[in-house]
Image (cartoon, rainbow, N blue to C red):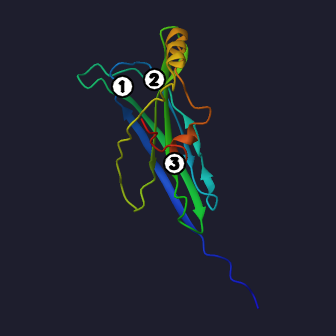
Amino acid sequence: MATASPSVFLLMVNGQVESAQFPEYDDLYCKYCFVYGQDWAPTAGLEEGISQITSKSQDVRQALVWNFPIDVTFKSTNPYGWPQIVLSVYGPDVFGNDVVRGYGAVHVPFSPGRHKRTIPMFVPESTSKLQKFTSWFMGRRPEYTDPKVVAQGEGREAQPG
């Protein structure tokens, strides 16, 4: 008796990281990567990328416009672990070093069609006063060694105050 192979479905993602609002910063660039479950596999396109550096627009919005294209196709047999896109935004500090200005993540939309997503961004905080002072003194913010941690829920529970 022949065993039937599981049916596969494809998820095609194409679009762009259009712009960002970071009023206090200029000359920023972004990186993207995808986080997905173990049953998922990229079959075409790029699952990570880095944009050009952009400057704030001169209008009242002061938008940072990248229009950075994204085009990737995944295959899976199971919707568990639906892909998320993780964005990391970097820019120069007062010493000219590239430092993280924000992290954010959002699931790829579940339904076909045109979608626009606004991704809230955050930066990690040091956990102790000494780390906060050292980070301020050295001009280096805490940052993740792997930005994919932004899309994971483990270890993100609220700590008792």
| Disc on the earlier residue, 2 or 3 | 2
Q: Is residue 5 left or right of residue 85?
A: right
Q: Amino acid at mark 1?
A: Phe
- Which label belongs to residue 153? 3
Residue 154 in the image: x percent, y percent? 55, 47
- Which label belongs to residue 22? 1
- Which label belongs to residue 90? none
Residue at the outermost front position = 161
Q: CA distance from mark 3 to mark 1?
A: 26 Å
Disc 2 secondary structure class:
loop
Image: 8 above or below 49: below
Q: Which residue is mark 2?
A: 28
Residue 53 in the image: x percent, y percent? 48, 23
Res 77 → quadrant = bottom right
Q: CA distance from mark 2 to mark 3?
A: 27 Å
Residue at the outermost left position = 60
Q: Is residue 23 left or right of residue 46?
A: left
Quadrant location of the C terminus in the rendered image:
top left
Q: Is residue 110 left or right of residue 35?
A: left
Q: CA distance from mark 1 to mark 2?
A: 9 Å
Using the image as rendered, state which of residue 139 and residue 7 is in the foreground.
139
Image: 134 above or below 151: above
Disc 1 secondary structure class:
loop
